[in-house]
């Protein structure tokens, strides 16, 4: 029996463990929080910080193969570990995604268009950047951003002070794309074959994913364009394992926004919406098994459950309706903007969701 080591024990780790168990693998998770969701069901735990070199090495020693669900592992640590142990995805895709400037340069080099952008690190470069890009534009910290944290939209000179309050942190200034919608694609590569899950449309509220609607409302031509460019990108970069790319879609144009070399929130719908799911295919890759081509089983909608919706989600779970799949991650502390669970509605189109379900959740 093989053991999969997972750096990170959050909800993504939890769902990796669930699928690893179905495939008969053991799991060991490393996380600094003793109440991390994945610890409840994984076989073994290591409670340690993500920069604890000895603990990371211990995880590698006790595993046959190692993956990560947490993105901000210090680079130098993984680089030395991947020489000695089977960290099958390697450090490269993580490194390329850890800095927004590096990430966007890499996307462009490998065939994916991005919004115009400029590097910013002080007041002078901020003003230069605004001059080059124009209003509206988006200021983001280069590293450690998630769920819209560390971002400011600049609409006029009046907003410069808001962005300047973050300085002198390394940052990026991006052209604001007035997109029609956002879409993402989750892929898994074993180095030869690349599979992809059906493209979803993502709706964010306050910078946090709220809904994922599948299939995304795109033409066959645009679907093929996104899939082909994304797979070519993965091949050119030489990435293996799982990769999610987020795009802005405007007419027939697409703009790479960001990528994540781990299972993605927008791919949670695959658990019930597809014949196989993102966590399962990641595990199949890690366990040297052949990948399976994903197929959408029915129109599906995934609704994220933040702290403010936890009670409603628990009530909905009690109703035990067919086609309504409630996942609660078991986090001990609930906060308004914290991801506490998600609900997947299968055989559901957006009109029916709006009519029957929308009012059950917190409205902004
Ligand atoms: N250049 C942009 N133009 C328009 N909207 C943007 C732009 N950058 C970010 N956004 C909006 O903010 C959200 C969060 O930004 P993102 O770069 O994905 O950071 P995070 O790491 O927080 O997910 C995006 O999903 C999108 O809705
Ligand atoms: Mg994002």
Image (cartoon, rainbow, N blue to C red):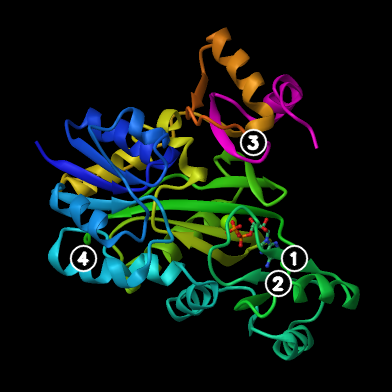
Tag nearer the camera, 1 or 2: 2
At mark 4, the secondary structure is helix
| Residue bearing mark 2 | 166
| Residue bearing mark 1 | 152
Taking the image in four quarters, ligand 1 sits in the one at: bottom right
User: Could you tell which of marks 4 and 2 lies nearer the N-terminus?
Assistant: 4
60 w.r.t. 143: above or below: above
Instruction: Please tell me which residue is depicted at 70% across the width and 72% down the height of the picture.
Output: 166
Residues at discs 3 and 1 in contact (Cβ within 8 Å): no
Region of the chain picked out in magenta, as a range: 336-364
Instruction: Please tell me which residue is depicted at 81% across the width and 72% down the height of the picture.
Output: 136
Tag nearer the camera, 3 or 1: 3
User: Could you tell which of marks 1 and 4 lies nearer the N-terminus?
Assistant: 4
* In-image side of 294 versus 220 (left or right): left
Where residue 20 appears, as percent x and y from the top left, is: 25, 35
User: Could you tell which of marks 3 and 2 lies nearer the N-terminus?
Assistant: 2
Query: Label 4 vs label 3: CA separation?
Result: 35 Å
Query: Label 1 vs label 2: CA separation?
Result: 10 Å
Instruction: Please tell me which residue is depicted at 51% across the width and 54% down the height of the picture.
Output: 223
| Residue bearing mark 4 | 81
Where residue 42 appears, as percent x and y from the top left, is: 28, 32
Residue 164 in sight in this render: yes
| Residue bearing mark 3 | 335
At mark 1, the secondary structure is strand
Where residue 189 appears, as percent x and y from the top left, is: 28, 56
Quarter of the rendering occupied by the N terminus:
top left
Residues at discs 1 and 4 in contact (Cβ within 8 Å): no
User: Could you tell which of marks 4 and 3 lies nearer the N-terminus?
Assistant: 4
């Amino acid at each position: 029996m093989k053991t999969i080591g997972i750096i990170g024990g959050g909800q993504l780790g939890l769902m990796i463990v669930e699928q690893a168990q179905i495939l008969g693998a053991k799991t060991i998770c490393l996380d600094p929080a003793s109440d991390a969701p994945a610890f409840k069901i994984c076989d073994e735990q290591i409670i340690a910080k993500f920069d604890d070199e000895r603990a990371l090495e211990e995880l590698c020693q006790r595993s046959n193969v190692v993956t990560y669900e947490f993105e901000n592992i210090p680079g130098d640590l993984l680089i030395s570990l991947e020489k000695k142990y089977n960290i099958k995805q390697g450090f490269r895709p993580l490194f390329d995604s850890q800095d927004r400037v590096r990430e966007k340069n890499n996307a462009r080099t490998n065939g994916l268009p991005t919004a115009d952008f400029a590097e910013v690190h002080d007041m002078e470069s901020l003003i230069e950047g605004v001059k080059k890009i124009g209003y509206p534009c988006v200021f983001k910290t280069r590293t450690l951003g998630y769920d819209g944290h560390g971002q400011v939209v600049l609409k006029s000179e009046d907003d410069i002070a808001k962005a300047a309050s973050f300085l002198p942190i390394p940052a990026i200034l991006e052209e604001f794309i007035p997109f029609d919608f956002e879409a993402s694609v989750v892929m898994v590569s074993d180095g030869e074959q690349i599979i992809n899950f059906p493209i979803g449309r993502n709706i964010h509220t306050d910078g946090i994913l709220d809904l994922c609607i599948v299939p995304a409302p795109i033409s066959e031509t645009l679907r093929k364009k996104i899939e082909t460019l994304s797979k070519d990108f993965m091949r050119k970069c030489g990435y293996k394992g799982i990769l999610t790319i987020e795009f802005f879609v405007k007419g027939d144009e697409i703009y790479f926004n960001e990528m994540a070399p781990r299972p993605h929130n927008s791919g949670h719908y695959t658990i019930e919406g597809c014949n196989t799911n993102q966590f399962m295919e990641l595990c199949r890759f890690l366990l040297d098994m052949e990948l399976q081509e994903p197929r959408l089983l029915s129109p599906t909608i995934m609704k994220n459950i933040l702290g403010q919706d936890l009670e409603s989600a628990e009530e909905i779970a009690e109703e035990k309706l067919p086609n309504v799949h409630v996942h609660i991650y078991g986090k001990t502390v609930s906060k308004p903007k914290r991801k506490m669970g998600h609900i997947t509605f299968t055989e559901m189109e957006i009109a029916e969701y709006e009519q029957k379900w929308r009012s059950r959740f917190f409205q902004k």
